[in-house]
Every structure is written in structure tokens, then in C-alpha cells.
Image (cartoon, helix red, strand yellow):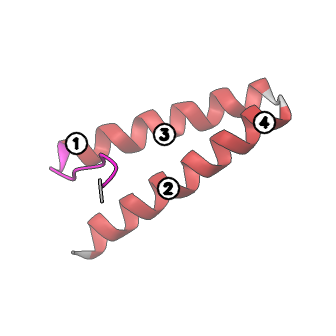
């Protein structure tokens, strides 16, 4: 896995965690910000052919 792929997947994982935490605490503004960031990261990953679907064991 190259550095770009590793970095984008890590950023997606971190943003998903931050989004989950914002929703759990009821911070609607932060949840919207995190959702926007997540959407952008997923779009960027898709544009570069990075598969962001969860791995099934």
C-alpha cells in the first residue's frame, strides 16, 4: 500500500471516529463538519481508485 492510500484510509478512519463521537455527544454542528470532511475524503479516495469499503473477514 502506498503512502497516499495509507494516509487517506487513516484520515477516513479518524474522521469516522470523530463523527461517531460528535453524534454520541449531540454536537450537531461538529457532526455536520465531520460528515462533510468524510464525504470529501471518500470522494478523493474514489477519484484515486482507493477502495474504502470495510473489509469483511
- Cα distance, mark 1 to mark 3? 12 Å
- Disc nearer the start of the sequence (2/4): 2
Which residue is labeled 2 in the image? 13
The magenta segment is: 47-55
- Disc nearer the start of the sequence (4/1): 4
- Cα distance, mark 4 to mark 1? 28 Å
Residue shown at 31% from the left, 37% from the top: 43
| Dot 1 crowding, Cα within 10 Å, few <14, some 14–19, many 20+ | few
Which residue is labeled 4 in the image? 24
Residue shown at 22% from the left, 75% from the top: 2
- Cα distance, mark 3 to mark 4? 17 Å
Which residue is labeled 1 in the image? 46
Tell me the element at label 3.
helix
* Quadrant of image for the C terminus: bottom left
Which residue is labeled 3 in the image? 38
Nearer to the camera, 38 or 53: 53
- Cα distance, mark 2 to mark 4? 17 Å
Q: Position of residue 54 (x, y in %)?
A: 34, 49
- Disc nearer the start of the sequence (1/3): 3
Front label number (1 vs 2): 2
- Disc nearer the start of the sequence (3/4): 4
Q: Is residue 54 left or right of residue 49?
A: right
Does residue 30 show up magenta in the picture? Answer: no
Amino acid at each position: 500500500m502506498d503512502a497516499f492510500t495509507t494516509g487517506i484510509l487513516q484520515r477516513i478512519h479518524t474522521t469516522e471516529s470523530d463523527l461517531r463521537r460528535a453524534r454520541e455527544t449531540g454536537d450537531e454542528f461538529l457532526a455536520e463538519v465531520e460528515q462533510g470532511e468524510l464525504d470529501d475524503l471518500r470522494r478523493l479516495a474514489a477519484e484515486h481508485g482507493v477502495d474504502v469499503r470495510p473489509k469483511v473477514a
